[in-house]
Amino acid sequence: MALLLEQLLNGVQLGVTLFLLAAGLTLVFGIMGVINLAHGSLYMVGAYAAAVAASATGSAIVALLSGLAAAAGVGMVVEYVVLRRLYARDHLDQVLATFGLILFFNEGMVLLFGRQPLFVNVPEALRGTVRVLPGVDYPIYRVAIIAVGLLVALGLYLLIQRTRVGMLVRAGATHREMVRALGVDVRLLYTLVFGLGALLAGLAGVMTGPILSVQVGMGEQILILTFVVVVIGGIGSVRGALFGAVLVGLVDTVLRAYVPGLLRQVMEGSEADALGAGLASMGVYLLMALVLLVKPRGLFPAHA
Amino acid sequence: MHKMLRDERAWAVALLLLAALIPVVAPMLDSPATVGLATRIVIYAIAASSLNLILGHAGLVSFGHAAYFGLGGYAVGILYAHYSSGEPFLGFIPGSNDLLVTMPVAIIVGGIGAAIIGALSFRTAGVQFIMITLAFAQMLYFLFVSLKAYGGDDGLAIRRVAPVLGMNLRDAATLFWICLGLLAVWLFLMDRIARSRFGRVLAGVRQGERRMAALGVRTYFYKLVAFVIAGMGAAMAGALMVNYLRFVSPDMMAWTKSGEMMIMVILGGLGTLLGPVIGAGVLVTLEYTLSGLTEHWQFIEGPILLLVVLFARGGLMGAVRRLAGRRVPAPEAVPHGELPQAQKPLGEALPEAVRHG
Amino acid sequence: MTLNRRGLLASGAALGLGAASLARPALAQAAPLKIGMITTLSGAGGYIGQDIRDAFMLAMEMEGGKLGGTPIQLLVEDDGFRPGQGKQVAERFMKNERVKLLTGIIFSNILGAVVGDVLDAGGIYVSPNASPSNLAGKECHKNFWSVAWQNDSLHESAGQLANNLGQKKMFILAPNYQAGRDALTGFKRLYKGQVAGEVYTRLDQTDYAAEMAQIRAAAPDGVYQFHPGGLGISFLRQYVQAGLLSNIPMTLASPSMDATTLAAVGDAAVGINLTSQWNSDLDVPASKRFVAAFQAKYNRIPTFYAQQSFDTALAIGAALKGTGGKVDDTEAFYRAMKPANFESTRGKFAFGANNHPIQDWWAIKVENVSGKPALVSKDRVLTNHGDVYAAQCKF
């Protein structure tokens, strides 16, 4: 029982990380209609900036702020220089251009920081474990990630539902021309939304830095999973991104933890482990295919 | 003469004839490995051209095309593994190392795979279609990664290849000519399709599927057939690739490979006959040349791709057209970027999906 | 064309001859022998390729641009972690550059795509790392040499170490790919205790929280895990963060704990046990010279990968000395290579019947040395250890 609870917490934590990435992607996707493959690069930029700042100053706050600033800054520059020219193009041009950006950013990081993976320590205050329930010890740092993720979700909800900017964002997702007709500076709005998405990706990068190794290519490892989340949740829907992310996180973690054990009941040990690991990896994609076959627009289509 | 220059088919024939000289010229230039490079380009050209049938002509963005490429490759690899071990596949299908057997099997397996995946995937459209095709490809990828019997992640090596009709496949020039011949056949088929009623229906699907449906055309059927043909083409390319590499691994069906094929098509020019061929040639050569110059080749390749998108609408073929001063392209060869705003297929599919959600 | 190739530039720099050698390649003297190095320089495994390349070039530089008295031109190219690209590079090396002797590949799937072509064309391949079981057993080849280890030995030695440490109940983990599955098989071959759990992770996995929970629940005496490169860093850091390292000791094979991984994990790694064929503190004169020279030139501690590559260069040098710098006669090369007449940084080194190493394995512990965690050598775990596949090998 304790084990199951811990696995569920792990699933939620992975889900929350995915949400931070998916929220930005789904906004950019839904509002500007841009497929941005380089979203993972912004996550990487955030992680690298935080790692470098942390090793230079030793301060977790400085690391956090540098990571966020770098990701948001790079994001807005990319929007201004490149993506702005691609809004009117079809998705395929966007795919090719943002793929080019991935190559550029990955190799740029190698040129700047070398090939050795960087590392960040968990901040002093967040080390160790905490007893979340009787018999379940859980790393404080992961609890903190879950808390931050949920706070961001709440913040995004308030931003989108309760503010003028949020109203424009909602309107922009459904009636782009109308917003433009109202005399709103759509270009500025787009840059800001893109910056916000980049900021969230950077936050995910900063927070996962101490858990994973900060290395070139880390963005692509998580990019595909993020797209899966966005599509399952419904494109353009932040609420869908949250549900989709937690669902994907849970499914992935629980399958990984339990499928090999179940298979071992019916077949020989090492075969079961190998096949089980493969089946668990397929699980998330199977989930997406099933969701799309039943609900072709995802679980929470924007503006339902 | 001027008219001939405008015809892509004439250029295709000229290009293929010139390419056929590579195995003769390369050793004279003291660069025999160029034949291998050219073989790789030709194989990717077949794969990219098959993707172009659905991506360029019908506007259906499949992000899982490497699945069929890999299925074709594994058909050859698995048949060989059973040939060399002597145990029949599933207990009753004997293995083989003969290209005349393995190639048709590969094509059929690819076609069946595409039929199943396509039949399910066409329930969705737009971005969801992109993602569901990716999902199926990823499932196959992880399946082959976990198939311990066939090497898993490490792949299968193919040590002995049977001669085909007296031709030695281990000879670089022979293999190249076989690949080139199949590319020629494939391009001929693509050209016939583009100019047929079938091709016009596909173009209609791209420009507005609802309008086609309103005209009473069963678009689902046409889309599926195109999808299956494309899958068979990719499987053929996959089988050739395995014969060239003498090695098959799940790497062949990774999502990055699907992305690479997509980039070849877009780079060369969507919906054109020669675009995918040129895209494959330019991308493979670019990587080959740049990675020979510097280990940071990606830092240069990335911006080059970006510049092509920003300044060469309709890919390299579009750029060539503009340089040639041709303003009005033929209807069956409309490069994507030059479509009028209202006809853009995918750019509009997305807000539509949101709007009617 | 060839003048622009990075390989030549790299060799020029390595020889310390600078631009002069580029301006007049192969003057009146005999042209240098070309050695082709295909290795992974991009992506997450990039730092490994860098060490392999740097150590090989160091060995050449220490001999004034020569190996075994033969002037060498080293051509280095990135395989991009893609089997197809590796094969392409090999083909160009062999056909255009007329290279007969190749080395450098790190990952066994790339080796699988390349090595058949090299051997079939009458070339020689000397592996500084990847050595999968098929090439040691049934498909062994007279012209395939491993100067690293046969994959299984890494894990057999770890299994023996777990016995020595009195760990009766082990939880074992590795990624779900060939080398990972071989790792757990190899570990179990010599390990005599009970296996409390056997888990395969994903090769692209970065978060191991689910596995941590399973380990905690199984409460074993020890954990054995094999995760090379960046995967290992993630795994270890999360193991520490989950508070497991203080309760359940960890045993590793060398690819999971190289100098780079240690730097990434830091103090938290103190107390970890591992086995290796070599360590930077070994009391072997050749090793001391290598470590000092490597640190002086590259300002970092050499990893096991660097050592393997350095020994590879020395082994090739010894063979070239025997053949008078010729590689065309592979039979002569075989005879000159087989006695392993070089001063290995591991001390003892011999080639077995299948051209794979017979060597000693050491227990190594991560300890605090003057305030910094370091890999400290302990006892010998296995002596003159070869591999189980040699019996299946017939040239």
Image (spheres, coloured by chain):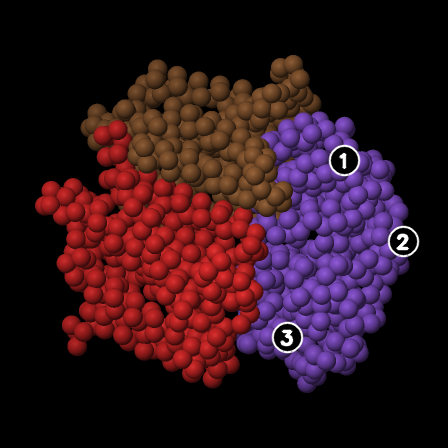
Chain colours: A brown, B red, C purple
Q: Chain of mark 1?
A: C
- Which one is in front, A276 or C253? A276
Rate crowding at label 1 as few (under 14), some (14 to 19) or many (20 or more) other CA atoms within 10 Å: many
Q: Is residue C342 above or below residue C376?
A: below
Any mark on residue B299, and which? none
Q: Earlier in the sequence, mark 3 or mark 2?
A: 3
Q: Is residue A196 above or below residue B136?
A: above
**Amino acid at circle 1:** Lys
| Foreground: disc 3 or disc 2 | 3
Rate crowding at label 2 as few (under 14), some (14 to 19) or many (20 or more) other CA atoms within 10 Å: few
User: Which residue in the protein does label 2 denote?
Assistant: C283
Rate crowding at label 3 as few (under 14), some (14 to 19) or many (20 or more) other CA atoms within 10 Å: many
- Which one is in front, C275 or A195? C275
Q: Chain of mark 3?
A: C
SS of the residue at dot 3? loop
User: Which residue in the protein does label 3 denote?
Assistant: C123
**Amino acid at circle 2:** Asp
Q: Earlier in the sequence, mark 2 or mark 1?
A: 1
Q: Position of residue B309 (x, y in %)?
A: 34, 52
Give the spatial CA distance, label 2 vs label 1: 33 Å
**Amino acid at circle 3:** Gly
Q: Place residue C55 in its image quadrant.
A: bottom right
Q: Earlier in the sequence, mark 1 or mark 3?
A: 3
